[in-house]
Amino acid sequence: MRLIPALVLSVAGALAQAADPAFDPATAEAVLRINDARWVEREATRLAAAMGRDPAPLRAAVAGALYHARSLEGIDTARPALVAWRSGTSPMVAVIPLRDRRRFLDDFGVMPAGEAPLVRTGDRDGTTVWSQNHAQGLREYRLLVVNDTAYLGRSLEDCRALAARPLVGGADPTVALTATMTGAFLQDGPALIDWPAAPWEVPRLLWLDTAGPLASAATAISAGTKRLSWECRPMGNDGEVRLTARIEALPETPFAQWLAAQRDHASRLSTPLQGERTAAMLWGSLVWQGQAEAYARDSTPAIRAALGPAWIPAVAEAWTTWWALWERSNEAAWALEVTDPGQRTIITALEQPRSAEHAAAWNVVAGAVTGIPGSGEGRAFQRNGRLATTAFEQVLLASDRHLVAVDVFGGQAARPVAEAVSGRLALTTTPSGQSGILMGWCDVARLARLSPHLDAEIALEPAPLTLAVTAPGLDQLEVVIAAPLRRVATVLARSSPPTQRVRTR
C-alpha cells in the first residue's frame, strides 16, 4: 500500500513535466539574441582605450549584461547565444556557448539591477542547480552542459529539450544584438540590458521641469505596446552603430489611437533654428488627441502645491490655456546652443495660428514658475533676472504663423536671437530634411562644452548622434538612433572629471 502514494506522486510529476511545453522563442515574453559578441567585446575595449580607462570593468559589464556572468573568460564569444524570459515559474532560459566550463560556472549568476543573484546550490542528475530568492518566491533552475554549450532551464528535461532544438542557428552576422519583448514584459519584467550611465550629466536645461509629461508619455506607450523589438547593427569599421527599435501597438488602446493619427513630415522649422553653436535639436509634427490638456488637468495639484502663493486664478487659467494651445500647434522645434559651461541658449519655435494668445499664456506661466515678472504685451514679452545663481533672460515673440521663445542662461541677450530666428522662419516655406513624426540631432562634442572639466582650448572632433521616429504603418512606430561610438567616447573622456587611470597588463 505504501507504493500507491509514491506511484501517484510519480505520475503527477510526469504529467506536470508533460504539461510544461517546450520553450518556443516565438511565444516568449522576451528574447535577447547575441549574434556577434566579439564586436561588442572589441568595441568595449576600444571605448575604454578612447576614454583612457582600464577595459576590464567595461568587459565585465558586458559579461553581466549579456550573459549574466562576472566575466567573459569562460564564454565562447565567437558563437551566438540566447537569453530569454517566458511565463510561469523560473522564467529565464539561456543557451550560452562555452570555452571554459569551470570558469563559466564560477562566474555565472549575475542578474539585472534590483534582482537577487542566482546561487549555485548543488549538482543533480548531471546538472548544476541554481536558485534565486525572488519577490514572487524561490526560483530553481538547472544548467546542463552539452557539446561546450550551457543550457539553462526549469528542469533536466527542459534543458535536454533546449539542447535538442537549435535556437541560435542562422544568426544575422550584420546585427550584433537583437531583442524582442512583449508590452507586459516591458512594464513589469527586468531590464534585458543594464545600459551604462554617462560619466557626466547634462544639467537641467529648462526653467520648467519636463519629467512629468515625459513620464506620462512613457507610461502610455508601454501600456499600449503589444511587442517591442530592437537591434544593434555595426556600421563600418570606425565604431559607428545604428540602433533600431520597432514598436507594435495594442489595437484600440489610447497609444494605438494616437499612433493612427500620426503622419511623417519633413520640417520647416529645423533649418532656421540651427546655428554654428547648436549642440542639440528636436523637431516634429505630432498630432495630439487631448493628452496635453489631460496632463494640465492631472498635474494641477502638483504645480499648485509647488507654486504656493504664486498660484492665483490668472496663473491657473494660463496653465490650462498654455497646454491646450501646445496641443493645437502644428510643427514644433527645440534647439540648444552651448558656448561654455556657464552660457547656453534654448530656442523653441512653434507653428501656431494662435501665437499671440499662446505667448500671453506662456508669459504668465513662466512668471509664476521662475518668480521673475515679465514685461510687454500683445506679441512680445521679456523677463530678466536670476534662476538660482545663473543670469536668466527670456523673450517671447509671436508672428502671424509662429511663436518663438528664447531662454538664455549666463548673461547673453535673448532678444537678438529671437528676432533673428523669427526672421528666418518668416522666409522659410519649403519643408526639408528626412520625414518623420519626431527627429533629433546632437553633437556630443558641442554638448560637452557644458562640462566644467573640459579645457575650452581643446578642439574636439564632431560626434553627431541622429534620431528618427517614424510611423511606417498601422499600429507601428520605428525609432532609429545612429552614433559614432569611439568619437563619443573620446569626447566623454576629455569632458569627464579627472580619474585615476588603472594600469593594464
Image (spheres, helix red, strand yellow):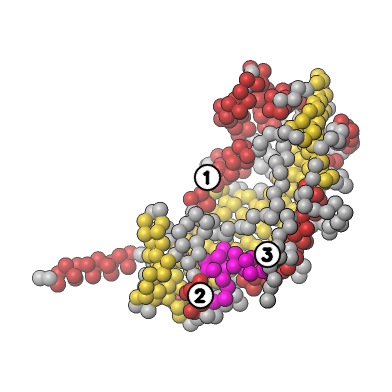
- Residue 490 placement (x, y as % from top left): 77, 61
Callout 1, which amino acid?
Answer: Ala
Q: Is residue 133 in view from this perspective?
A: yes
> Which residue is located at x 75 percent, y 38 percent?
332
- Residue 451 placement (x, y as % from top left): 76, 49
> Tag 1, which secondary structure?
helix
Task: Point out the stretch of residues depicted in magenta.
Answer: 54-74
Question: Which residue lies under the disc numbered 1?
Answer: 223
Callout 2, which amino acid?
Answer: Phe
The reply to whether the magenta stretch includes residue 64 is yes
CA–CA distance in space, label 2 to label 1: 37 Å
Mark sitting earlier along the chain (3/1) = 1
Above/below status of 99 relative to 281: below
Few, some or many residues within 10 Å of mark 3 (<14, 14–19, 20+): many
Q: Which mark is residue 104?
A: 2
> Which residue is located at x 68 percent, y 34 percent?
208
